[in-house]
Amino acid sequence: MDEKKESNRTIHRENKIPGQIQVRNARVHNLKNIDVDIPLNQIVGIAGVSGSGKSSLALGVLYAEGSRRYLDALSTYTRRRMTQAARAQVDEVLYIPAALALHQRPGVPGIRSTFGTGTELLNCLRLMYSRLSRHRCPNGHYLEPSLAVAAGQELVCPECRERFFGLSAEELAFNSQGACRTCGGTGVVRTVDQDTLVPDESLTIDEGAVAPWNTLMWSLMTDVCREMGVRTDVPFSQLTAREREIVFHGPAEKKHIFYKPKNGSNQAGELDFTYFNANYTVENALAKVKDEKGMKRVEKFLKQGICPDCGGSRLSAAARMPKLRGITLDEACSMPLARLVSWVARVPGELPAEMRPMAGVICESFQTVAKRLMDLGLGYLSLDRAAATLSTGERQRMQLARAVRNCTTGVLYVLDEPSIGLHPSNIVGLTGVMRDLIADGNSVVLVDHDTQILSEADWIVEMGPEAGADGGRVIAQGTVPEMKKNPVSQIGPFLSGEYRPRMRKRTSSEELFALGNIHLSTGEIHTVKPLEADIPQGRLTVITGVSGSGKTTLILESLIPGLEAVIAGKKLPAHVKEISAEQIRQVKLIDAAPIGINVRSTVATYANVHDELRKIYARTPDAKALGYKAGDFSYNTGGLRCPTCDGTGSISLDVQFLPDVEIPCPECRGSRYAGKAERIKRTNKAGKEYSLPEIMAMDVKHALTACEDLKTVRQRLQVLEELGLGYLTLGEETPSLSGGEAQRLKLASEMGRQQEGTVFVFDEPTIGLHPLDVRTLLTVFDRLVECGATVLVIEHDLDVISNADYVIDMGPGGGMDGGRIAAAGTPDEVAANPRSITGKYLRK
């Protein structure tokens, strides 16, 4: 340590600028007291198999210390009002800049957030319309643009002499004074779904044909309806038009009825009761909703539609009046960003000379932000696109553009899987943005598996050699050429192209549709044009295309709801014209959504291992002697859970003006169980004794050995191991799993079953996967196909695409330039198609 201090003093004496971050004895999560130097002012890639410790180093050490030290420099008063990170478990981190992190899964924005608000481009556009537009007087005349609005002066109409003020930027905001009064600035309204009121017209009203009267209203409404002149003892389909009108829209008249309860009691009597028609029953119930439980009862009778007043623009009528270059604000917001950029570029030139300097400043501010977004391949999005409908990759790129727009210097940017959701063609733009950050004097650390983006790194640090307890070490580091030649490196062979991407035996073109065909015909929706798509049954089909090309719309918004409707015998979605899928009986979406919402959901509970272990431990002699049942071994409600942390395994310490510190429970040391649970042992066939808390602390790989003599537990753990999840700890919280891990864990219950007639849809399953793990995933797809399943994968990973039986490539571009099937066929056929952008990268 003394030598290190002396070295530091020497650096300062010689006035040298440090060239690297020095990390010493880092032990966050599974890191094995590692020492590593991270070059500054370069792009540094951190690679390694899933669970090897990449994120622990990048986020748990570098970002945690870089952000914490920056916040520590602020005043105590300021820090009290900010969420702060605890000190990382590391002896020393030297020369680390202030750090910003772009996480793998940005939060899903609320209903009021759009692409325009999230990027702040809408702020610039609103300012343009406030300061530069032609404002309309109360009598409908438009005034020429002038500096009067910016000066806060009253405007005078030259036609009618009416005096008024131009709208401010705040009065053009749908989250403020410019909101549509009908929808409150959300662009959508909830209305009664007429199709849900009488779902089965073969029933009579007495048999419960009118669904809202069964759950939202007293059963006596059928008696009132009868007094209104409607026959309640004939099938609803046989009612006259007048009777149906009364059921759906009849007036609120008071009727005198004789009511007899259907439960057979003698409490019959005469009542005066007001008639509630089916629509009003739902509307009345909605108005009285006070909690989530009440909303669930009502929402099945509702549908969300575009606001009839603002047309979905969210803006009030007044906010839709000012015009700039001949169009209104809502019309500008509906343009794809690429077109809007060209439109904004012409704004200053069409204004009076005295307004051009101000216009130039506003427009330049807009163009600076827009350029970053265009570089990141988001030019197909419009500013009015609801942020909640954006993909994870799109939200992450928004986050990145927001972080880099200020041209900072001396900042460490930590990017967690920036390639998520990116087509190979989009990665070119991403690397350009990273190079710009370096040129501005910053440093970039990225955690990723994509060899295309890792090839752009100046330096690579590889973690491993395996996952979980068998990882957490630096196994190789160096430049890309050095990593390609390093025999220890696991990513090196993929960087050099040594590994052949093709590993599945593919079906020939002639045999592709031999097992059946799913045909989908759709009308226009969003930016997707009318389509005719064919998908082979019993095969692996990959849907590809650049961001915004229509992959999600084709599969998640068209095919899945269409198949579900056909299977249930219900009406097809409005935009789905036809779907034919003989033999298909169920559809299963395996997506990257987090599993569970709190720390009580663990890998063992989700995989149905914990319940089995509780029963087994309840049968041990120790448990029987002490009178413990299976329920006592539950760490959620059982008698053996830790009383200090209440079975969560951790406690939060409030240190007033310092950040809350989350620490392992001092009583159970994170096991979630009270000490007496440790004394209840089970001896396996190998003669080794383990308590349940000890088993829960193991990863899947080691638990397999400990539970080898437990058939059901062993089988369930074996499935997790085969899915490449052997490194996960049984007691690990499921909400903290990566997107790829969550998908594979959801798939665990499906493995080994016969799957004829089942369609599995995977939405970007390679998220967080090392190329070696991708190969494991491909074997999983093979097993599903062998069991008779039809497997559909929305994916950008070239290894997965090249191993598909069939490829549907959407495009050719994104947004209005996409929405078509650019190419379809085997990977070789798509690679040979000049219209396919994906094909270009398959040929490389």
Image: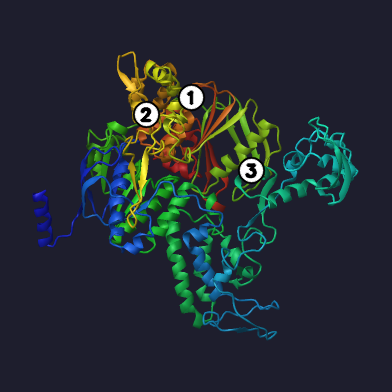
Residue 408 image-quadrant placement? bottom left
Residue 157 location, x and y as percent?
A: 65, 83
Task: Say which label, 1 or 3, has the lower sequence index.
Answer: 3
**Residue at left 36%, top 26%?**
677
Give the left or right position of residue 687, taking residue 503 as reference. Answer: left
Label 2 residue SS: helix
Residue that carries the numbered disc 3 in the rendered image: 296
**Nearer to the camera, 393 or 481:** 393
Residue that carries the numbered disc 1 in the rendered image: 751
Are discs 1 and 3 less than 8 Å apart at CB?
Answer: no
Residue that carries the numbered disc 2 in the rendered image: 696
Are discs 1 and 2 less than 8 Å apart at CB?
Answer: no
- The amino acid pointed to by label 1 is Met
**Residue at left 51%, top 25%?**
785
Q: How is the image coloured?
A: rainbow
Residue 635 location, x and y as percent?
A: 43, 32
Residue 240 location, x and y as percent?
A: 89, 41
